[in-house]
């Protein structure tokens, strides 16, 4: 399994934000290692740059990603 390309700078991946250990474990298994392309944080990093991704954005928060993309005037296809 390949690790996500932004994991070295991702606050979620590196436990720099406070979430339950269970949530982090499940999200990492799903997004950081299995399907990074579906991760809202990775998509946002590609859209606005990794240093500008909101710290609170969760990997599975497609709605927040879409709102961020709308504010930047960018069409998205993340479901």
Image: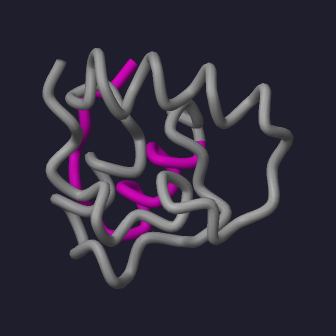
Which region is colored magenta? 64-79
Task: Name above or below for residue 69 compared with residue 24.
Answer: below
Q: Looking at the picture, how far across and down is residue 6, in whole percent? A: 23, 58
In which image quadrant can residue 9 be found?
A: bottom left
Task: Name above or below for residue 67 compared with residue 1.
Answer: below
In which image quadrant can residue 69 be found?
A: bottom left
Question: Which residue is at the far bottom?
Answer: 51
Q: How many labels does the image show?
A: 0
Task: Name above or below for residue 40 compared with residue 12.
Answer: above
Which is more toward the observer, 71 or 63?
A: 63
Q: Looking at the picture, how far across and down is residue 48, in whole percent? A: 25, 72
Task: Name above or below for residue 22 compared with residue 63.
Answer: above
Instruction: Give left or right: position of 60 versus 45.
Output: right
Which is more toward the observer, 21 or 73?
A: 21
> Residue at image x 32%, y 57%?
44
Tell me the quadrant of the picture where the N terminus can be found.
Answer: top left
Which is more toward the observer, 78 or 20?
A: 20
Instruction: Give left or right: position of 18 versus 10.
Output: right
Q: Looking at the picture, how far across and down is residue 62, in whole percent? A: 51, 33
> Residue at image x 33%, y 83%?
51
Instruction: Give left or right: position of 44 versus 71.
Output: left
> Residue at image x 27%, y 19%?
35
> Residue at image x 40%, y 63%?
10
In which image quadrant can residue 40 be found?
A: top left
Q: Looking at the picture, how far across and down is residue 78, in whole percent? A: 32, 27
Tell me the quadrant of the picture where the C terminus can be found.
Answer: top left
Q: Does the magenta stretch include residue 68?
A: yes
Which is more toward the observer, 27 or 61?
A: 27
The image's colouring method is one colour
């Amino acid at each position: 399994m390949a690790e996500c390309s932004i994991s070295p700078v991702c606050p979620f991946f590196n436990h720099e934000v406070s979430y339950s250990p269970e949530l982090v474990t499940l999200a990492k298994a799903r997004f950081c290692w299995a399907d990074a392309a579906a991760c809202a944080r990775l998509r946002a990093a590609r859209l606005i740059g990794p240093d500008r991704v909101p710290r609170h954005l969760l990997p599975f928060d497609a709605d927040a990603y879409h709102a961020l993309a709308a504010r930047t005037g960018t069409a998205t296809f993340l479901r």
